[in-house]
Image (spheres, rainbow, N blue to C red):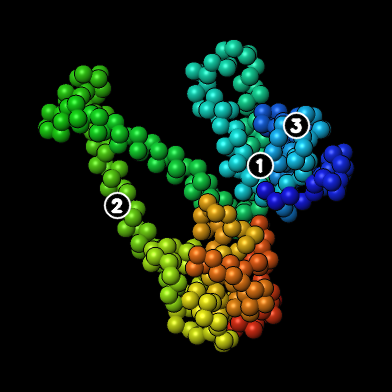
Amino acid sequence: MPTIYREPDYVYEDLVDLVEGQLRVVELTAINAEIGGPGERLWMTEPGLAVSEVYRLWHKGKGKSTDKAPAEGRYWAVDRDDAWDAMPRLREALAGVLARLTRPGSASEYALEPGREERDLAVLAELEAVWLSGLSLLGEAHGPRAVERELNHELFIPIQAELARAGALRSRMLQERYGTGPDAAARAATELGWDIGKARRALAAGDEYRQWVRDGAAHARDRIAVRRPPGETGLPDVLAATLMTAACAYEDVVPGRPSPLPLPDELARWYVFVQGLGACVAVAVEDAYTPDGSPRDYMRVAPVAMVVQAGWTVRDGVIFSPLPYAEYPDGIEYDEEAVRASGGTPLSDGSP
């Protein structure tokens, strides 16, 4: 989460006022009570606004602190993050709460602390609010079908896949005990007290899961356009293709079209012509890059003129450039003149 305000520029009370007094936010008190330290605060933007962000007031740095008194080397700071990007960190921090909500009937905390389930449900309600705030912007921009696709991609498909893997594991266990012969289902049904249909389905689940994976892999090869850098990058072929494919994932690539601008050798290795943007380079955006991040999070295409103007460095064979980047809607802020200079057509010129 990038820091937007911090000590010593502002004292603690001023940091609170900068958020609550100047931004339209609601405080996430239930989540903060679960994961926040002394004096720490957590907010999200009010629902219905044109942005969806989470703000965290916390102690940054090392060392132990007390309420409103950071230890040496620590300081109060307000960090801001897009709500969608904040979700993985919130879910990780709230793993204990989510585990209890997954198996409430066996959660010892609920036996020991009557009413704890209500606090956990309040946390869940705030977590849902953060998630829905990100989805609402997606819906406004692309419609309800885009929201449904995102929910399927982020929630339902992973859950269904986990269930399928569990079924495959049980299938293997059953096959090792009862075999795969014509009487296997009957033997399993008799010993486990199942009906014969359930036993047959359970025994077949492993083969069905593996076929589902193979069918999905074939579909991916048909659907996903693999892009490769046109020049020698010094990287292994698969890694170079992975980075280039991630950069071009949402772009309409025009194969074989040359650049109207001269290309330095380093940029030419990552060149691609994109409909609308013109001559581009696949780059790692400095503000989006994290060492352990997915290439889909930081690889983008940028008009050649923008990269030349902003400058670039080459690290481990990859072009890095300090291009202007917006966390939402998750992309480079393109300069229209640079797009025109690169042979593209800015949206303001009426391109689709």
Q: How far apart are marks 3 and 1 (CA)?
A: 28 Å
Residue depth check, mark 2 versus mark 3: number of the one nearer the observer = 3
Q: How far apart are marks 2 and 1 (CA)?
A: 36 Å
Q: Name the residue under label 2.
A: 214
Residue 65, how many percent across, how many down?
75, 31
Query: Which residue appears farthest toward the left when viewing the image?
Result: 182
* Residue type, numbered disc 3: Ser
Q: Which mark is residue 130?
A: 1
Q: Mark 3 points at which residue?
A: 65
Q: Looking at the image, which is closer to me, 324 or 54?
A: 324
Does residue 286 appear anywhere in the picture? yes
- Side of 198 where 182 appears, left or right: left
Asked whether the beta carbons under mark 2 and mark 1 sit within 8 Å of each other, the answer is no
Asked whether the beta carbons under mark 2 and mark 3 sit within 8 Å of each other, the answer is no
Mark 2 Cα shell of 10 Å, populated few (<14), some (14-19), many (≥20): few
* Residue type, numbered disc 1: Val
Give the structural element (helix, strand or loop) at label 3. loop
Residue 337, how many percent across, how many down?
69, 80
* Residue type, numbered disc 2: Arg
Residue depth check, mark 3 versus mark 1: number of the one nearer the observer = 3
Mark earlier in primary sequence (3, 1):
3
Give the structural element (helix, strand or loop) at label 1. helix
- Side of 211 where 59 appears, left or right: right
